């Protein structure tokens, strides 16, 4: 864990724009221990810096792709221009080193810059793949995507949404990550469901009180008809 995350941070630390480790690694940075295996390194970048991160990665020898379809087998479109119109509607990108250890990539015979891919490894060992997740901000606030907060305007101060470990590696705070994975898109997913169960149950008991209260309030706003995690968090508050 430390090697992959450290390598990612070493790559990004001089990029000149904000970034943060997200996904399951963010929780491991918070807890300072390994929770489970990981299929990739997830990196949070703000939408405002989409062009910058594409240019930065290309300049540093990475290939950047827009995912077209599929899960294990599908298609990727190679992005060669940071100002490509194809980037306008993307919420995530895949950045893959040449000869990546967990992908096979074959050029599509009929489409320029389109590649057929297959994932051949389920745990990333080498630092040769990054999933870039784009998030929103307004002034000094992290803004949750409308689809992940049921249309409600839910925010977290940037100073609380992005934390730093003792080595100076930025990561999404645990309450932000846990709020994201309560979305049914993730919590009810066959692929994400078990990972998210491990992440939530392992991390929720260690949330600081203010973080836990923010998470409860955010969930109550996003899910006015109720959510199973709300009662779980309230029970943890009673135990403190």
Image (cartoon, grey):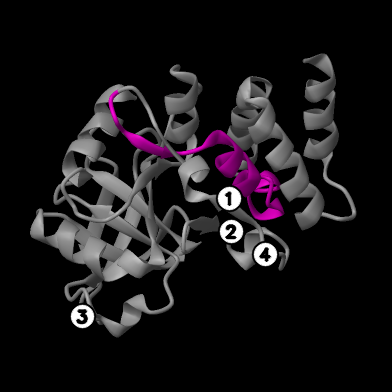
Task: Return the mark for residue 141.
Answer: none
Query: Measured along the vertical axis of the image, is residue 156 above or below residue 50?
Result: above
- Of 173 and 134, the residue lying toward us: 173
Say whether residue 223 is left or right of residue 154.
right
Residue 76 seen by the camera: no
Q: CA distance from mark 3 to mark 4?
A: 40 Å
Q: Secondary structure at mark 4?
A: loop
Q: Which residue is mark 4?
A: 153
> Label 1 near label 4: C-beta < 8 Å?
no
Residue 157 seen by the camera: yes
- Counting other residues with Cα less than 10 Å from the Cα at mark 1, is it few (<14), some (14-19), or many (20 or more)? many
- Counting other residues with Cα less than 10 Å from the Cα at mark 2, is it few (<14), some (14-19), or many (20 or more)? many
Q: Which residue is mark 2?
A: 144
Percent position of residue 22, x then y = 44, 42
Q: Which residue is mark 1?
A: 156
Q: Quadrant of residue 216?
A: top right
Q: Earlier in the sequence, mark 1 or mark 2?
A: 2
């Amino acid at each position: 864990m430390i090697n992959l995350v450290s390598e990612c941070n070493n790559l990004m630390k001089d990029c000149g724009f904000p970034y943060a480790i997200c996904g399951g690694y963010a929780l491991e940075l918070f807890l300072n221990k390994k929770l489970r295996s990981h299929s990739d390194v997830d990196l949070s970048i703000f939408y405002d810096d989409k062009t910058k991160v594409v240019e930065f990665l290309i300049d540093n020898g990475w290939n950047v792709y827009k995912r077209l379809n599929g899960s294990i087998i599908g298609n990727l479109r190679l992005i060669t221009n940071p100002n490509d119109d194809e980037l306008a509607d993307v919420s995530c990108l895949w950045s893959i080193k040449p000869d990546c250890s967990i992908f096979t990539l074959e050029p599509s015979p009929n489409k320029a810059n389109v590649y057929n891919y297959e994932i051949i490894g389920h745990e990333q060992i080498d630092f040769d793949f990054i999933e870039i997740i784009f998030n929103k901000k307004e002034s000094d606030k992290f803004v949750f995507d409308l689809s992940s907060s049921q249309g409600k305007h839910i925010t977290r101060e940037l100073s609380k949404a992005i934390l730093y470990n003792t080595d100076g590696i930025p990561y999404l705070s645990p309450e932000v990550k846990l709020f994201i994975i309560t979305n049914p898109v993730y919590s009810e997913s066959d692929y994400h469901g078990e990972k998210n169960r491990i992440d939530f149950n392992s991390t929720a008991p260690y949330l600081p009180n203010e973080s836990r209260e923010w998470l409860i309030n955010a969930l109550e706003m996003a899910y006015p008809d109720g959510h199973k995690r709300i009662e779980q968090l309230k029970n943890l508050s009673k135990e403190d």
